[in-house]
Image (cartoon, rainbow, N blue to C red):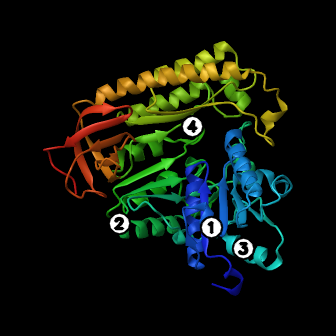
Amino acid sequence: MTSNQRNLANFFIRTYGCQMNELDTEIMVGQLEKKGLKRTFDEEDADLLIFNTCSIRDLAERKVMGKIGQLGRSKAKRPIIGITGCMAMAKKETLFKKLPNVDFVLGTNNITDLGTVLDEVLETKRPSLRTDDQFEENLDYLVAKRDDKVKAYVSIIRGCNKFCTYCVVPYTRGQEVSRPPEDIVQECQKLVDNGYKEITLLGQNVNSYGKDKKEWNCLFHDLLYRLDQIPGLERVRFMTSHPIDITKELMEAIRDLPSLCEFVHFPIQAGSSRILRKMHRIYTKEQYLEKVAMLKEIVPNVSLGTDIIVGFPTETDEEFQMTYDVMKEIRYSVAFIFAYSARKGTPAMRWKDDIPESVKLERVHKLMELQEGIYAEQRQEFLGQTVEVLVEKRNKDGKLKGRTRCWKNVVFESDKELVGTLQNIDIHSFNHQTLIGNLSESLILA
């Protein structure tokens, strides 16, 4: 620890938003611990508070603003406060005006600068801003400090080139930048060597991997074949897939590679082709359904997840019904349903947010009710089945908990220490969305 850090002993970090933010937090934790600071989970004990933020939803931003504003009114000791993540990129220097107790703002493309920024703040006693628009592939991913010892996130591509009209990501994370395949394989190999069994590959659009680096001759499906060769890597997942970029080769990889889970998060966003065009999703409903049909033909046991936005500007009742009908037809196994909220800096801001909040909420509730019925049918279908479960931990009741390959939660009782192993579980019942079973008398997996 340098002399400039002697006043910093403990740090607290809170993460908002997506899995990419969770991974960024793990990298920042590793950087800070490497500098000699200790993590605390009690913010009152911290000399340094970091809020790793999200700008996808207005609610997420308001939570952060309210929390930091509250800290500014506190009469307790004055910690150093930093804002990182997408909100840092979206609001930049305006955060210092709205929240004068903030000491630094660090963008998504500047995580490497965390230590330098801390030194600068401590030395100059002045606020520091680092928000580069373009990401350079210079992160030390191997420094990431992970709390989970069974599953890990691995970044393969950052940024997005799609520019959906409602989304801030292209502005907060920049253009797509793929990570060298050799570095990804090296990190995954190290994780497996350290006992990790499952890896989730992350990107705003993993299907675009390698397209910005044609000289590598390594697209997403090529990368998956390389990762499948790592001995001891039991499961590989990925998110998120943009429907326009999913290929037959990727579908065949899901079918053919033993490590690759048969689950694809495949957001449709809306069931109306007109609304999809207004969202700049680059596909029609019919094209989306064609991709789904091809995927189900190639991978008959595939499970699909989706994101849905209701109440997008000018969405009619008839167009909402189209979304309802698509969800009813596809029967997603995971669905994240949101009411549209205008985000400053996006093209959709120029359109009047003309759907009343009451209508948006009514539509959200209708979709959630439909989806809950689908979940209930799917849970019934699992009764009597034997499923492969990666055991992740013991829950507060002492039962072992894990997930199936298609992302379903499972709990079962056992006096054996099976965390980190694959087990066959006979499903006999369920509680809410959690499947309940017993260790199968069939072959137990190592």
Of labels 4 and 2, earlier in sequence is 2
Q: Is residue 104 above or below residue 278?
A: below
Identity, as a three-letter code, of the amino acid under mark 1: Ala
Secondary structure at badge 1 equals: loop
Q: Which label was assigned to residue 243?
A: 4
**Is residue 264 shown to the viewer in this render?**
yes
Return the disc, 2 or 3, that comes first in the chain's sequence: 3
- Which residue is the site of mark 3? 118
**Of tags 2 and 3, which is closer to the observer?**
3
Task: Please identify the residue farthest to the left as the structure is shown.
Answer: 441
Say which label, 4 or 1, has the lower sequence index: 1
Q: Earlier in the sequence, mark 2 or mark 1?
A: 1
Q: Name the amino acid, label 3.
A: Leu
Estimate the x, y position of residue 365 in percent, counting from the top left: 56, 22
Look at the picture and state if 183 lies above or below 56.
below
User: Residue 164 versus residue 308: which sits nearer the camera?
Assistant: 308
Q: Residue furthest bottom?
A: 3
- How far apart in space, not on screen, are marks 4 and 1 (Cα)? 43 Å
